[in-house]
């Protein structure tokens, strides 16, 4: 494991130009996240959590400052390069699962592999990922709307893991689940961190944040506290 | 399972909204049918005319620049014979120019009136050497002219006047003008029909035998005068490749003589060119009308594609956020437009054959040329145009989908 942080934010600022005036969502944020970290990002609504997640997920680029993901300066990359970095390095887990409604659970998990290899999965990795998150063969044939919330989130985790990314970005991963299922999902994430993944999760729930080794509290686009 | 995941997604999207997709495709179906049918109709017309004209493609028609129609009531007088028509000298020069390369058929003709019983008719009467009749006409019923007062008539004329072999008709000695009454019976001559000439349809040799009466040249000149002043001379060329050469030879021999009246030389190819050009313009016009329906179809497809994009904004956001390239999203929507096009063009192609066949049969009266390559060619052309229009209609929606901001797209619900 190298000393170089897996993710480095240097004075990252994100400003939105609105009709009512400029809105600074992230204000000179500097942060290092190392490989195998388990980081929780907390904060009230409008504190900049989602903006931070979009930056870390390379869905957006900073207005100023520098963001490095796995040694790559995001601002200097082309759109296609950013897309490939997102596909290969980051696994995204959303609060609303965001599975592709027209594909079965199996196909949803297989999809990132197809994007990467430009061919269907014949290695058995998709099935292995589904087994690992507790989705059996029969359930894997179902479309997302035929699965429960917990099952959908398990499929979403399998999809996020199938390309073996270094980083797992989790945006309120238990927000739409009951307590018991939420606990099971958090156990899966903890296991993944133990296996070497870097887990970053955004949450409102202090109990969920307790699973993390580091907690960063955002307020008005700045890091107010880090524990 | 189809190999390409984006094609699979497009197929499933079309299946999910099948009724809507089918309705949008109907626009393409109508467009393809319109283009194919109009194209086939025009081509079938052209093929029919070409076929009829090509029957006389080996014929050179020679006329005097000012054609003498025959002096009314002049009897056997030849007082006007020097005014126009092709003279015997010119005919001999034509024969010299043609040599062994064809048959020279001099013809007299005029428009006249005739009666059979109480029925009056009007048509063209041709005077020619009976030996030349079988060179370009076919006597379907009866025999050829063998005597002075014998005539052949065209089948169309025979049917319209209810005439048959053995019937008699009285022909006016006036080439044109009001019908004469019984009181002027001295100006009418009676001929007996000895044969019916088979129909030839549209021809380029200026002999409308279908509606004409054919008599011997002796009877004609006795009735109308103008001996050795032929209305036209037809040359039946043995080898059509030699037409231009023979025409040039005739022109050189006859038209260089400044003392005689010049002659006009034409053949089927020049007439065919004019008719083909007219029919091409007509076909193009019909195709343009068909094209309008495809424009309407394009708007319909565009609308359905925009609906599809707007309904799937969040899905597009998911695809982009988990590493799908913009080009792959674009491809997915173009596939969808392509599927709609295949659906519309496929149905349109099949319907074009059925509807086109019926329309051609109803409008032209024959489907003899329908399956010829030049005609049936319009079915794949219509299908390709429909398909291309469909894919082009999907370009903007696909571009719009691929250029969405994934963050905004994910938030869209």
Image (cartoon, helix red, strand yellow):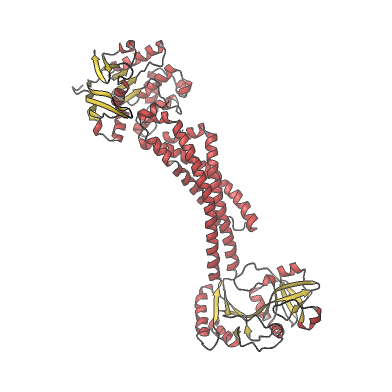
Q: Give the camera-side residue of A45 and A22.
A: A22
Whole-percent x, y for residue A138 in the image: 47, 21
At 38% from the left and 36% from the top, the residue drawn is B402
Whole-percent x, y for residue A61 in the image: 28, 30
Position of the C terminus of chain B by quadrant: top left
Which image quarter: residue B274?
A: bottom right
Q: Give the camera-side residue of B101 and B161.
A: B161
Q: Residue furthest left?
A: A3
At 46% from the left and 34% from the top, the residue drawn is B308
Whole-percent x, y for residue B369 in the image: 59, 58
Which image quarter: residue B236?
A: bottom right
Residue A161 visible in rendering? no
Q: Give the camera-side residue of A52 and B246.
A: A52
In this rendering, would A208 be left or right of A150? left
At 65% from the left and 72% from the top, the residue drawn is B208
So how many labels did they put on this image?
0
At 45% from the left and 21% from the top, the residue drawn is A137
């Amino acid at each position: 494991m190298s000393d170089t942080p897996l993710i480095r934010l240097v004075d990252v600022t994100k400003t939105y130009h609105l009709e009512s005036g400029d809105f600074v969502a992230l204000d000179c944020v500097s942060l290092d996240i190392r490989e195998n970290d388990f980081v929780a990002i907390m904060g009230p609504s409008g504190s900049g959590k989602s903006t931070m997640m979009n930056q870390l997920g390379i869905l957006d680029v900073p207005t100023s400052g520098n963001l490095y993901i796995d040694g790559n300066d995001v601002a200097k990359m082309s759109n296609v390069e950013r897309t490939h970095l997102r596909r290969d390095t980051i696994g995204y887990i959303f609060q609303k699962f965001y599975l592709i409604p027209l594909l079965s659970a199996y196909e949803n998990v297989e999809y990132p592999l197809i994007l990467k290899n430009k061919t269907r999965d014949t290695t058995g990795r998709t099935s292995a990922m589904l087994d690992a998150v507790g989705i059996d063969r029969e359930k894997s044939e179902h479309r997302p709307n035929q699965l429960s919330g917990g099952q959908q989130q398990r499929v979403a985790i399998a999809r996020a893991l199938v390309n073996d990314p270094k980083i797992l970005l989790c945006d309120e991963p238990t927000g739409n689940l009951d307590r018991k299922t939420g606990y099971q999902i958090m156990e899966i994430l903890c296991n993944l961190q133990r296996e070497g993944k870097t887990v970053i999760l955004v949450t409102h729930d202090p109990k969920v944040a307790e699973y993390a080794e580091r907690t960063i509290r955002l307020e008005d686009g700045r890091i107010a506290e880090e524990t | 399972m189809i190999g390409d995941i984006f094609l699979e997604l497009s197929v499933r999207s079309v299946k999910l909204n099948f009724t809507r997709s089918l309705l949008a495709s109907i626009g393409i179906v109508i467009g393809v049918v319109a283009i194919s049918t109009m194209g086939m109709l025009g081509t079938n017309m052209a093929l029919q005319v070409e076929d009829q004209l090509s029957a006389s493609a080996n014929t050179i028609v020679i006329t005097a620049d000012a054609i003498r129609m025959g002096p009314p009531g002049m009897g056997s007088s030849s007082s006007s014979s020097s005014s126009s028509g092709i003279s015997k000298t010119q005919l001999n020069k034509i024969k010299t120019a043609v040599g062994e390369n064809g048959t020279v058929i001099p013809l007299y003709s005029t428009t006249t009136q005739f009666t059979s019983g109480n029925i009056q008719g009007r048509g063209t009467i041709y005077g020619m050497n009976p030996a030349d009749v079988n060179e370009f006409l076919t006597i379907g019923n009866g025999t050829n002219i063998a005597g002075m007062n014998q005539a052949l008539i065209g089948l169309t004329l025979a049917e319209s006047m209810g005439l048959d072999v053995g019937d008699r008709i009285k022909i006016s000695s006036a080439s044109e003008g009001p019908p004469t009454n019984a009181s002027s019976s001295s100006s009418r001559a009676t001929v007996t029909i000895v044969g019916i000439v088979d129909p030839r349809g549209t021809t380029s040799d200026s002999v409308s035998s279908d509606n004409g009466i054919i008599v011997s040249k002796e009877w004609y000149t006795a009735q109308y005068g103008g001996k050795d002043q032929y209305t036209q001379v037809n040359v039946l060329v043995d080898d059509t490749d030699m037409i231009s050469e023979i025409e040039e030879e005739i022109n050189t021999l006859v038209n260089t003589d400044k003392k005689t009246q010049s002659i006009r030389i034409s053949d089927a190819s020049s007439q065919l060119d004019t008719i083909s050009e007219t029919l091409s313009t007509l076909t193009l016009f019909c195709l343009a009308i068909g094209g309008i329906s495809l424009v309407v179809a394009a708007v319909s497809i565009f609308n359905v594609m925009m609906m599809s994009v707007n309904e799937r904004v969040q899905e597009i956001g998911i695809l982009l956020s988990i590493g799908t390239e913009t080009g792959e999203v674009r491809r997915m929507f173009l596939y969808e437009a392509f599927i709609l096009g295949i659906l519309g063009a496929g149905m349109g192609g099949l319907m074009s054959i059925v509807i086109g066949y019926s329309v051609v049969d109803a409008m032209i009266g024959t489907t003899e040329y329908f399956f010829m390559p030049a005609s049936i060619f319009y079915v794949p052309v219509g299908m390709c145009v429909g398909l291309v229009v469909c894919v082009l209609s999907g370009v903007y929606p696909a571009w719009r989908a691929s250029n969405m901001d994934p963050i905004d797209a994910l938030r869209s619900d």
